[in-house]
Image: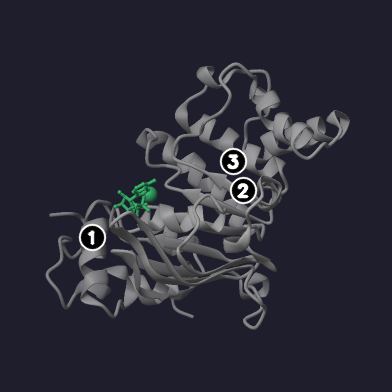
Amino acid sequence: MNATESFLRRDPGTAAEPLAAPLVALHDVHLRFGDNAVLNGIDVEVRRGEAVTIIGPSGSGKSTILRCITGLLRPQRGKIRVDDTAVETLHSEDELIALRKRVGFVFQQYNLFPHLTVLENLVIAPTRVVGRARAEAEPEAHELLARVRLSGKANAYPGELSGGQQQRVAIARALAMRPELILFDEVTSALDPETVGEVLTVIRELVEDGMTCVLVTHEMRFAAEISDHIYFTEAGRIVEHGPPEQIFGNPVHERTRAFLRRALGAIPRLPAGFDAAFASTPSPLSADGVPQ
Ligand SMILES: Nc1ncnc2c1ncn2[C@@H]1O[C@H](COP(=O)(O)OP(=O)(O)O)[C@@H](O)[C@H]1O
Ligand SMILES: [Mg+2]
């Protein structure tokens, strides 16, 4: 295994069984808002323990895909499975709530309750929605705060925290529901650059611990590092998907290459070995990976 491969590959001992049934599966999903066809036949599979990242231009349907997985949006055509639940057939509020207990969702806007302490933000859903005893929920909330490195902030109010700290509380809040998977939709896009890293570190640790994660992010280096599989979307279609070494190292479609040239041009250094992928096409990066 060369340096690039070892950089990219997660421990094969913890990788999902290749033949295991997917935990999440979208098949031929079509969704339109009025005349606007937003998803035009989406197929995505996520296995237990995998980190799957969706990349693509703004407006290409990435958030819509995540919202379909949680049943927030219903496609006009296609199938969506979360484990053995046929999401597109769920109608009652009870069924949808049952699904959302299993699928955590972290957004760009953290949406914490501003009038509740950090601890209460973590305890409220497990006690009120799931009916867990406070004596159980509170110690677990403290453990989760330690996990996102915010032990000292249990009694703080969200307004007293930085954006990165609030986003880590939002991740802990999602974990407090003990979800089977977590969806992350551009969770670092609204953050000051200096707090992005601390949020990505927390997500990386979740992935390493085996949490199933579906991410939408513009942090390409991070996506390359932590993902088992990358999907590239454009105009509501999956243009190309594969392991990160393929998508970042040897993309097949010119549209994927063009998108990555733009996206990677925004970061100062590519992961080691990735520069070669763009050698055959005009690159916005100089030989040592610095934007020109
Ligand atoms: N609730 C909505 N009503 C109407 N159009 C929407 C709605 N949500 C998203 N769209 C449209 O769907 C398209 C895809 O949006 P989205 O999934 O948010 O893209 P992305 O996350 O890739 O930026 C966009 O053209 C957007 O304007
Ligand atoms: Mg979006």
Which residue is denoted by mark 2 in the rendering? 104
Picture quadrant of residue 45? bottom right
Answer with left or right where residue 42 lies relative to residue 142.
left
Amino acid found under the numbered disc labelled 3: Ile
The secondary element bearing badge 2 is classed as: strand
Is residue 3 visible in this depiction of the protein? no
In depth, the one of 95 and 223 nearer the eye is: 95
**Residue at 31% of width from left, 69% of height from top?**
274
Checking the image for residue 171, the label placed there is: 3
The secondary element bearing badge 3 is classed as: helix
Amino acid found under the numbered disc labelled 1: Gly
**Residue at 65% of width from left, 20% of height from top?**
117
Which image quarter holds the C terminus?
bottom left
Count of numbered circles in the view: 3
Q: Which sits earlier in the primary sequence, circle 1 or circle 2? A: 2
Checking the image for residue 289, the label placed there is: 1
CB of mark 2 near ligand 2 (< 8 Å)? no
